[in-house]
Image: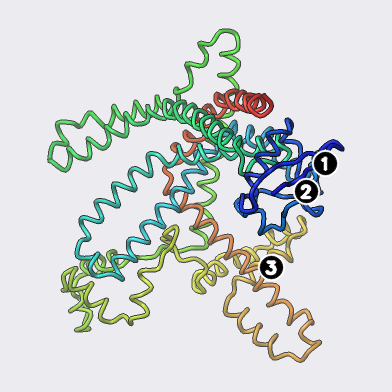
Amino acid sequence: MLIYYKYNNELFNIKTHKYASLYKLKYEIFKRVNDKNNVVILFNNKILNYQDDNIYLNKLGIENGVVLMVQDKIKGGNTFTTILIIFIILFLFIFLPLFLISGFLPSIIYIIELFVLKIISCFMVFIFHKLPRFYDNKKILTILVKCFILFLKIFFLFYAVQDLFKLSYFSWCSVLKSGDGLFTVSDSYCENSSTITTIGTVTSFFYIIVYALLRSPNLTFKSLNSFYSFAKKKKLGIIFSWIPQLSADIKETVYENKFDWIGIIPIIGPIILVFLQSYFSILDGGMELVTNYLSFVVNLGCSKKLSTRNLIKSSKSKKNNSNNALVNAVNNMTINENLKFLKSIKSDREIETNFKCELINSNSECCSDELLQSIHDQFSKYLESPIAVQHMNTLGIEDIIKLIIYALNVKQVKKDMNNFYNSFGPYKLLDDNIKPVVATFWRYTMCNIFYVADFVQNIVFKMGTPLDLTDTIKCGMFAGAVTLPVYIICLIIIVFIIFL
């Protein structure tokens, strides 16, 4: 059949078959239209987009003698597209560069890695618990899983950084194409996609190599510590007693003098080194302040939980001075007998909860009524001091402090809340009735602070010591600063790839 198309007020024709695909027809038209990236094909005033490329012409209603319109694209877009492009540009040229220089990229990736590894561990526990056949081969599966987790730990940082750069370069390509053509089925799509993937991989390798070189000195004292622990287990600790001091000296040198070589750079080296030393001092002090504050908040509102193993050890360490025969019998049990006994007295529902997945294990129990009541008893003593009350009154916070301390009085607040529930309609809004509601809100707010502090403290503990955290940020900052020029050059290269 014969299909006509009109372009620049001229009529052309193409001979094709009614069962040919739309993609075939587009290909024939674009062969004759030189500027194919800036034109659209319309049929019945509708654009023939790539989603229908695999459909044959007869099914689309394109029959013999049909006239198609080939028009130039109208540049521009709706408000959402404009906002999206502005956001991508801000991300590419402001947010991502600042993010690289800040040095927090590796730390955030490590946090994500913790959650991923925890999900894998929870999945394996679920498999072993629900499928007995897997449990019979637990040792083999555990070895395989540990090997996989080790592989994931080694390469997780690289793949995460690679995905970040790939996303950035694809977004930049989309902006250069004005939002068109990036995910369109075309010959240029695969070429651009492959090129951007290669550029993203090269940038990622550059970042990872710089970061790994800066972090590699940490392996020296960590390896010495591991070797000394192994020697102690083999009763050789006396022979290698000199290793801990050597490890401590190397550790201090690595953490304190790792970046001193920057001062060797002519002219700008000493200036950069002074700036880095000042920034690192602030970073070390800030990290110590954060960890100390988290510890203070957690110790204030949370109490340590004893695991089953600790409970067993505690019971085994006690003397059999109880007159209770059951207590004495439990104290005399072996660890395995204790575990069987604990399992026998638990309900099926309680046993099932042992296999629930918690992304970060919490070693604390926060906001128990007894703990809050004890905090109230301690802080209420401040209200008995006329000097403290006068000082709070001067600052204008006396009523707020009294409300916070009242909120910690769990017994009284619960009693007053019953009065609030039992009050009739408008009387609920009286001061004495509304006070326990506000106090409960305060208590929930404080409890959330305690839980968040405990959660963050667990994440920080999983990531390492405060020195490890700051060293990660320092190395990430330097690696990001060195990679930033490479990143900008790659954005310029993509411009030439798109328009040449």
Q: Residues within 10 Å of mark 1 (few under 14, many from 20)?
A: few
Amino acid at the residue labelled 1: Ile
The CA distance from mark 3 to mark 1 is 66 Å
The residue labelled by disc 2 is: 42
Q: Which mark is residue 402?
A: 3
In this view, the residue farthest toward the front is 1
Judge left or right: residue 133 versus residue 104: left
Which of the 4 quarters of the picture holds residue 30? top right
| Disc nearer the start of the sequence (2/3) | 2
Q: Residue at x 63, y 36 (%)?
A: 96
Q: Residue furthest right?
A: 9
Q: Nearer the viewer, residue 363 or 6?
A: 6
Q: Is residue 267 above or below residue 38?
A: above
User: Which callout, 1 or 2, points at the residue further toward the start of the chain?
Assistant: 2
Which residue is pictured at 36% across the width and 57% down the height? Answer: 121
- Front position in the image: 256 or 17: 17
Disc 1: which residue: 74
- From the viewer's perspective, tell me whether residue 454 is left or right of residue 171: left
Instruction: Residue at the far top: name it.
Output: 266
Looking at this view, is 13 or 148 the one in front? 13
Q: Nearer the viewer, mark 2 or mark 3?
A: 2
